[in-house]
Image: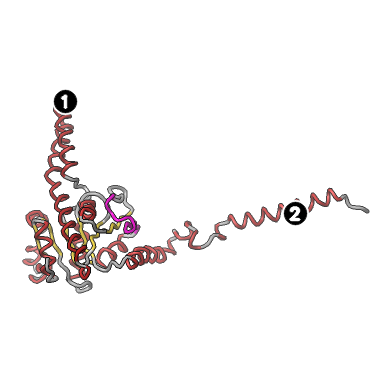
């Protein structure tokens, strides 16, 4: 019995296509993906330790490559705006109120006035960071790089001050529902993003030679008290912890009451210093390290 060559060729083609389809199905299956390229695999709960390690290693290696081993951490509210922005917002609020004297417009005016008042902290953060960066650019043996949370407000002002002075600065962004996108003043190759607060905090403090806390909310208080706890318990070396605007912080936190109640010792209060000008904050750091400003 003879076989039709045409039918034989069709069977061969069909068999080959089946083989191709089978291989394609295998290659498209998630199990075939390279482990490090498989997003669904990496996001499993069982892989959290791997994600933590990767999130630590990426900034660590980049900072090492850029020879950054000493930083000044600047914290503060993400909600403060620059004096120029605040003046513009106030002008707009005044104009809107003059056109329609409503309770909503009055609230907007009050808010704009508060923003203008608080914009002094933005300016102070910017000036302090410029002072520190200008010094570091001229002293290779004690170069300290400004590091911030990478977002708006005080963080933006800190990175902006470093740029004003012609230096680099670091931004440690984190995924949040609001108020978190990189500000435009961070050095691009030193702009990082985190998912885990814990790893971000490690990078804040690992190279820290000083911490300057401007007025802020829960995030600022979280970072401040964690730093104080680590220094108090000697888990971290002592560095200057400077609270900007003494009257604000003493109104917010009654540290003396903690001493009176026996919850901290009198010596623990020595871990905290206050400054009311950018120049004073910088002098506290230079005095601590006996640097010639």
Q: Which residue is mark 1?
A: 99
Q: Secondary structure at mark 1?
A: helix
Residue found farthest to the bottom = 234
Say left or right for 60 vs 24.
left
Residue found farthest to the top = 99
Quadrant showing the N terminus: bottom right
Q: Secondary structure at mark 2?
A: helix
- Residue 105 location, x and y as percent? 17, 32
Say left or right for 74 vs 24.
left
Q: Which mark is residue 15?
A: 2
Distance from Cα at disc 2 to Cα at disc 1 = 79 Å
In this view of the protein, which residue sits in the foreground, 85 or 110?
85
- Residue 147 location, x and y as percent? 24, 60
- Residue 158 location, x and y as percent? 21, 55
Q: Which mark is residue 117?
A: none
Q: Is residue 264 above or below residue 115?
A: below
Question: In the image, which residues are magenta?
Answer: 183-195
- Magenta region includes residue 140: no
In this view of the protein, which residue sits in the foreground, 226 or 273?
273
Label 2–label 1 contact, CB within 8 A: no
Residue shown at 30% from the left, 63% from the top: 198
Quadrant showing the C terminus: bottom left
Residue found farthest to the right = 1
Dot 2 crowding, Cα within 10 Å, few <14, some 14–19, many 20+:
few
- Residue 45 location, x and y as percent? 43, 61
Dot 1 crowding, Cα within 10 Å, few <14, some 14–19, many 20+:
few
Residue shown at 17% from the left, 41% from the top: 86
In this view of the protein, which residue sits in the foreground, 4 or 50?
4
On the question of residue 234 being in view, the answer is yes
Give the mark, 2 or 1, whose residue is nearer the N terminus: 2
């Amino acid at each position: 019995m003879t076989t039709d060559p045409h039918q034989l060729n069709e069977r061969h083609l069909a068999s080959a296509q089946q083989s191709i389809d089978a291989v394609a199905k295998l290659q498209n299956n998630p199990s075939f993906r390279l482990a490090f390229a498989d997003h669904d695999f990496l996001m499993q709960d069982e892989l959290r330790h791997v994600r933590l390690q990767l999130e630590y290693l990426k900034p660590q290696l980049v900072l090492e490559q850029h020879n950054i081993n000493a930083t000044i951490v600047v914290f503060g509210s993400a909600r403060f705006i620059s004096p120029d922005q605040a003046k513009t917002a106030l002008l707009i609020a005044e104009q809107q109120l003059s056109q329609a004297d409503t309770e909503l417009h009055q609230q907007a005016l009050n808010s704009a006035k508060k923003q203008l008042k608080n914009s002094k902290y933005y300016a102070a953060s910017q000036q302090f960071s410029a002072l520190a960066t200008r010094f570091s650019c001229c002293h290779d043996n004690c170069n300290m790089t400004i590091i911030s949370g990478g977002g708006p407000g005080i963080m933006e002002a800190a990175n902006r001050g470093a740029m004003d002075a012609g230096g680099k600065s670091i931004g440690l962004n984190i995924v949040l529902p609001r108020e978190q996108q990189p500000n435009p003043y961070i050095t691009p190759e030193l702009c990082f993003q985190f998912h885990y607060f814990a790893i971000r905090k490690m990078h804040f403090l690992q190279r820290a030679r000083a911490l300057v806390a401007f007025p802020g909310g829960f995030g600022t208080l979280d970072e401040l008290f964690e730093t104080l706890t680590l220094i108090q318990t000697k888990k971290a070396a002592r560095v200057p912890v400077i609270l900007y605007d003494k009257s604000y912080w003493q109104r917010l936190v009654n540290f003396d009451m903690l001493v009176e109640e026996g919850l901290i010792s009198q010596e623990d209060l020595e871990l905290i210093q206050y400054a009311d000008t950018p120049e004073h904050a910088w002098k506290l750091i230079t005095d601590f390290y006996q640097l010639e400003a």
